[in-house]
Image (cartoon, rainbow, N blue to C red):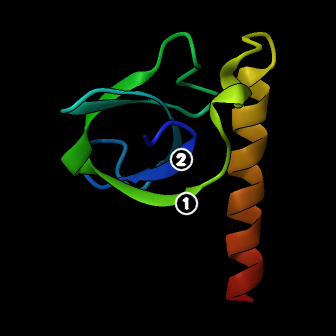
Amino acid sequence: LMIGWMACSKAGHDKDKIYIIIEETDKYVWLADGDIRKADNPKRKSRKHIQIIKKIADEQMFVNPASVNETIKRTIKLYKQSLLRQQK
């Protein structure tokens, strides 16, 4: 199961954008960034077009729909900040 994992898009107009996987099937994953792609309208993407980054949350993160988008947005923001700190 990859639900709750952070992933980066490898192809398409959203190349290099960071998402969190909120749903999956054999061929596809559904991605949300909490901003443009919210949890109630996720982006469908082929598994071969994403790169898994790391596990950040379990499925419990998606229980409360009122705060899930804020949680996703904050998690991605913190990850990007940690990348910037590592580059300095």
Q: In the picture, which quadrant includes the C terminus?
A: bottom right
Q: In the picture provided, is 42 more to the left or to the right than 68?
A: left
Q: Residue at x 68, y 61 (%)?
A: 80
Q: Are marks 2 and 1 in contact (CB under 8 Å)?
A: yes
Residue 74 position by quadrant: top right
Considering the numbered disc 2 on the image, is that residue within a helix, a strand or a loop?
strand
Q: Which residue is mark 2?
A: 5
Q: Residue 16: horizontal and vertical position, in percent?
A: 41, 56
Residue at image location 43% in from the left, 53% down from the top:
8
- Residue at the far bottom in the pictured view: 88
Instruction: Give the x, y percent position of residue 21.
Output: 48, 36
Q: Which quadrant of the figure contains the N terminus?
A: top left
Indicate the amino acid at tag 1: Lys
Q: Secondary structure at mark 1?
A: strand
Amino acid bearing label 2: Trp
User: Eyeballing the image, is 34 above or below 42?
Assistant: below
Task: Using the image, determine if residue 25 lies above or below residue 4.
Answer: above
The residue under the point 67% across, 73% down is 83
Give me the C-alpha separation between circle 2 and circle 1. 6 Å
**In this rendering, position of residue 66 left or right of residue 25:** right
Residue 54 marker = 1
Q: Callout 1 environment at 10 Å: few (<14), some (14 to 19), or many (20+)?
A: few
Crowd class of label 2 (few under 14; some 14 to 19; many from 20; radius 10 Å): some
N-terminal of the pair, mark 2 or mark 1, is: 2
- The residue at 46%/51% (across/down) is 7
